[in-house]
Image (spheres, helix red, strand yellow):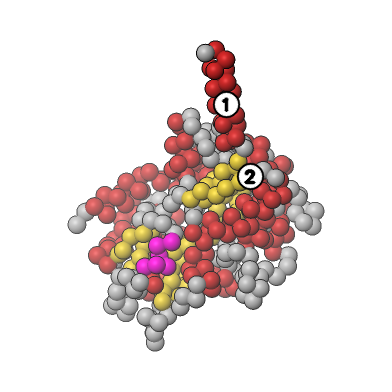
Amino acid sequence: MKRLLILTTALAGFTLQAQAAELTVMSWGGAYGGAQTEAHVKPWAGKSGFAAKMVDSDNPAQPVKAQVEAGNVTIDVASLEYADAIRLCDEGVLEKIDINALPAGADGTPAKDDFLPGAVTDCGVSTDIWANVYGYDTTKLTGTVPTTAADFYDLAKFPGKRGLRKGAKGNLEFALLADGVAPADVYKTLSTKEGVDRAFKKMDTIKKDVVWWEAGAQPPQLLADGEVVMATAYNGRLFNAAINEGKPFAIVWDGQVYENEMYVIPKGAPNKDKALEFIQFATSTEGLRAQAQHISYGPARKSSMMEKLMFKDGKTEMAPHLPTADANLKNSLLSDFQFWVDRDAELNERFNAWLAAN
């Protein structure tokens, strides 16, 4: 019996070890998760010889926090929105990452000088710069077409349903931009009760015509099915639908809200050292360039933009499709992470109450 117990314990230990001998990366699924799988997960596993897999979530911040708080962490690396990476770092949910541990750029520039401002935080390293934009189906909207944030809210000029992400973040900013608030004044306005009221009042004008979405794959599907005439979306999802799937979608960049997406390591990750090695690989000059060749999100390193970026099809130049292209930055807004770290809970409570009201 004693020998059997020892053998059982040894086998259990072996099983746990075997389970831990695989890096688990959690991201957002769809075209984005696919881009990270092809550009980062598969190449790193091939180079390191350490098995790696991608798992999906509608918002990785939630399972990361839940796992750490439960003391049962199975995620090694997660892809988080900037404000969530800052907030969870402040809450002690994430491991610290030293910028000096990150590789220099391909041209030898130290990481601290090669990454764009704000792209490396105490606990996160930027994988890309993405944007919340809106799109429409060019076969369903012809003749006069929308070109501004205000047009998204103009039901008289463009009747029909609208698709919006279910939540306060991004929607409040976009509503104010559509209402004529200059980008430089958006967060100053939202910092006041009157400004928040103004944003919700603007959203009231289309509330009865909104179809709410939660997963990034939904807006292109809503457009393709004709359930909405316009939908906000992650710009890379619309790009993927148009370029990879041949959907007749156009993007309106006016009023785009853009931000960094971050790789982080949850506190207690089973493969902490391998997780850092993965992030070093993925956020190198070559790693960021590789991701940008799979989806239209801008690299967060200057050295990644040194040569012309081409999509994986070898025909499509990526620059015009990136949030960071000069032409796309007119009337754009950089998401204020500190605002959302401070106000997320309060404004989402207000948003949910607004949503539930008739």
First to last magenta residue range: 217-222
**Residue at 41% across, 45% down:** 343
Task: Tell me the amino acid under the disc marked 1.
Answer: Leu
Would residue 25 be counted in the magenta stretch?
no
- Which quadrant holds residue 122? top right
Residue 292's place in the image compared with 264, above or below, is: below
Q: Nearer the viewer, mark 2 or mark 1?
A: 1
Report the magenta stretch's main SS.
helix
**Residue at 55% across, 49% down:** 54
Which residue in the protein does label 1 denote?
11
Q: Nearer the viewer, residue 86 or 13?
A: 13
Q: Could you say where residue 197 lies in the image, as x and y percent from the top left?
A: 31, 56
Q: Nearer the viewer, residue 191 or 124?
A: 124
Which residue in the protein does label 2 denote?
51
Helix, strand or loop at mark 1 = helix
Nearer-N-terminus badge (2/1): 1
Viewport quadrant of the C terminus: bottom left
Left/right placement of residue 241 relative to residue 38 reads: left
Q: Residues within 10 Å of mark 1 (few under 14, many from 20)?
A: few
**Residue at 62% across, 51% down:** 41
